[in-house]
Amino acid sequence: MSFETFIIDSSRISIDIAVNAIESNPILLQHAIDLCKHKYPVSMRAARVVQFYAERHYNEIIPYLSFISNELLNTKVDGVKRSFLKILFITPSILAIENSALLLDKCIDWLQSDKEPIAVRAYCIDLLIKFANEEPELKNEIRLTLENIPLEEYPSLKFRRKNGLKMLKMT
């Protein structure tokens, strides 16, 4: 049975079954990672599995952070972007990740793009705040970026930006 059969859809039940399978047989993690490079919808489902697995077993994801950061920079699949942004957000040090400067630039680009889905843009705000907290010299640039992004038509993004700006002022 291939790992792909575990992710026949993107329901929470299927994702949990796939994560449980990896927990029972850790070699399946590599298969899930490999499927993140496939076309949509397989890549999105696999990335979601990796994300949920990372939330339970972050230390086992560490060897794959380079792949995750590189794939995030290149993927066009929104679901992969969302899942990988979430994984990077739970990473203890975003600056220790390969290509962190490129990730910072990509987050700013995606945040400024009204073509990106709201969820991707929201997770970019979270990651930018993480960058600013880890590298204080970036705070002013990130604060200015957040202040100058027109988000009035997206109440959830506007709220997230407002909270992010408050956090930047407190630290």
Image (cartoon, grey):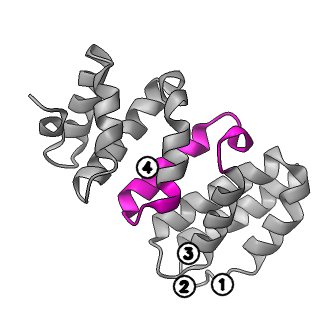
- State which quadrant residue 41 falls in: bottom left
Residue type of the residue flagged with mark 3: Pro
Please identify, in this view, whether the residue under mark 2 or under mark 4 is nearer the observer: 4
Q: Which residue is mark 4?
A: 83
Q: Is residue 83 magenta?
A: yes
Q: Are marks 1 and 3 in contact (CB under 8 Å)?
A: no
Q: Give the distance between the C-alpha atoms of the residues marked 3 and 4, in whole angstroms.
A: 22 Å
Above-or-below relation of 126 to 51: below
Residue type of the residue flagged with mark 1: Pro
Q: Give the distance between the C-alpha atoms of the residues marked 1 and 3, in whole angstroms.
A: 11 Å
**Label 3 CA crowd tier, 10 Å (few <14, some 14–19, many 20+):** few
Q: Are marks 2 and 4 in contact (CB under 8 Å)?
A: no
Q: Is residue 20 magenta?
A: no
Q: Which residue is mark 1?
A: 150
Which residue is rendered at x = 48% and y = 23% of the image?
A: 60
Please identify, in this view, whether the residue under mark 3 or under mark 4 is nearer the observer: 4
Residue type of the residue flagged with mark 4: Ser
**Lower position in the chain sequence, tag 3 or tag 4:** 4
Q: Is residue 120 visible?
A: yes
Which residue is rendered at x = 65% and y = 44% of the image?
A: 98
Q: Which residue is mark 3?
A: 155
